[in-house]
Image: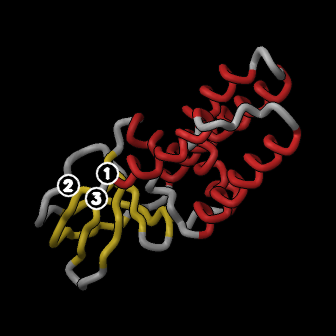
Amino acid sequence: MPSLLIRLLLFLSSYFPLTVIMFVLLLSKNAVLATSILTLGILGICGVGLYLLTVRRINPMSIEVVQVRRRDGEAMSYIVTYLLPFLAVPFGNFEQAVSMGIFFLVLAVLYVNSDMIHINPMLNLLGFHVYEIELKNGEIHSIITRRRVRRGQTVSAVKAAEDIFLEIRS
């Protein structure tokens, strides 16, 4: 399972597009804050890239898929939080900025503690898909992969989190 640091970086990467939006909206008002927010997003993107490269070094296991259901749509519900900067949150004063910071801190804690690493719009943008799969033993997991997964298929994967696999292709 990814460490707390990796899960935090995956959270930051999931909001990378929002950090770019916030950067553009805040640059003329507060360049330091805007640059800080963008830096966090870039840190997250670099972290997820590093994670995806290093996890491939782990010895994969073969898993046989009995049932499969596509779950890419979960990222769309997650993206609703991207609307916040456009809703009367002008960062006009310190209290508004702190309020928004607290909101994103709560989101981060929920994301990290709930092992929601598979709900990440950046993974979708990088060409990954999320499927819910049932294994021969009846266990249900999510799998993150770049290709279509079909019933009856055997997949090489590593455990990315408690109930989440990441397909490893040679």
Precedes in sequence: disc 1 or disc 3: 1
Quarter occupied by residue 167 = bottom left
Q: Earlier in the sequence, mark 2 or mark 3?
A: 3
Which of label 2 and label 1 is nearer to you?
1
Specify whether 133 is left or right of 141. left
Look at label 1 and name its amino acid.
Answer: Gly
Q: Residues within 10 Å of mark 2 (few under 14, many from 20)?
A: many
- Which of the 4 quarters of the picture holds residue 14? top right
Across and down, in percent, residue 63 comes to 27, 69
Dot 3 falls on a residue whose secondary structure is strand
Q: Nearer the viewer, residue 43 or 116?
A: 116
Neighbour class for label 1 at 10 Å: few (<14), some, many (≥20)? few
Residue to which mark 3 is pinned: 131
| Residue 153 higher or lower than 27, as above or below | below
Corner quadrant of residue 37: top right
Picture residue at 38% right of the left edge, 47% below the top: 76
Q: Please tell me how crowded label 3 is: few (under 14), some (14-19), or many (20+) other residues with Cα within 10 Å.
A: many
User: Label 1, on which residue?
Assistant: 73
Q: How many marks?
A: 3
Q: Is residue 43 left or right of residue 28?
A: left
* Mark drawn on residue 149: 2
Residue 154 drawn at (x, y percent): 20, 63
**Sequence-earlier tag: 2 or 1:** 1
- What type is the residue that disc 3 sits on? Tyr
- Across and down, in percent, residue 16 comes to 58, 35
Q: Amino acid at mark 2?
A: Val
Element carrying mark 2: loop
| Protein image colouring | secondary structure
Residue with the most extreme left position: 152
